[in-house]
Amino acid sequence: MFEHVSRRQLVVRVATTAVTFALAFAASAQTLSDPTAPPQALPGRAQAENNAPAWRLQSTLVGANRRIAVINGRAVVEGEAVDGAVVERIQLGRVRLRVGEAALELPMSIAVHKDASTPRGRP
């Protein structure tokens, strides 16, 4: 079968085949990560996100004839449902929600943004 192949050529072919199989095995055993992919969730991060409140009060509007709150990006009024909770009472800067039998006070988280380009004393 290998009469026309010299001993040296046979050794080179066998070595090349062995190296090819070794590299193929090593490549399949190793997972490569994409350096441009966003970082995966950290072990404690998923638990922290699960413990985060399901509702975020973003704004309240309280007037003589109307009360409106923005919760999770949606404008709601008293008695309306939002993401599994019923809005019981809207007050300035806080909302009381009813989740099943439990009542929940939802304070507004205030983020202050100051524009450095506007001089003091001018609107």
Image (cartoon, grey):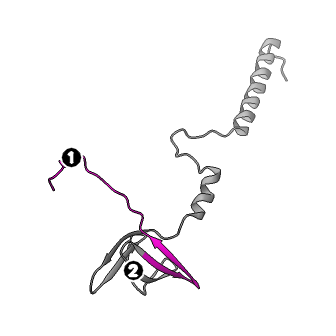
| Closer to us: 38 or 59 | 59
Residue located 55% across and 64% down the image: 52
Give how far apart the Cα atoms at labels 2 and 1 are.
Answer: 35 Å
Q: Is residue 13 left or right of residue 102?
A: right
Residue under the point 80% across and 18% down: 10
Going by the numbered disc 1, the residue's amino acid type is: Ser
Q: Is residue 121 in the magenta section?
A: yes
Looking at this view, name the residue that lies furthest to the left.
Answer: 122
> What kind of residue is marked 2?
Ile
Q: Position of residue 33 (x, y in %)?
A: 60, 40
Q: Which residues are magenta?
A: 95-123
The quadrant the N terminus occupies is top right
Q: In this rendering, would 14 be left or right of 50?
A: right
The percent position of residue 57, horizontal first and vertical second, equals 42, 70
**Residue 41: assigned label:** none
Which residue in the protein does label 2 denote? 90
Determine whether the residue tagged by mark 2 lies in a helix, strand or loop: strand
Q: Check disc 1 and report the residue beneath it.
A: 117
> Residue 87 location, x and y as percent?
45, 82
Q: Indicate whether 37 appears above or below 25.
A: below
Looking at the image, is 93 positioned above or below residue 78?
above
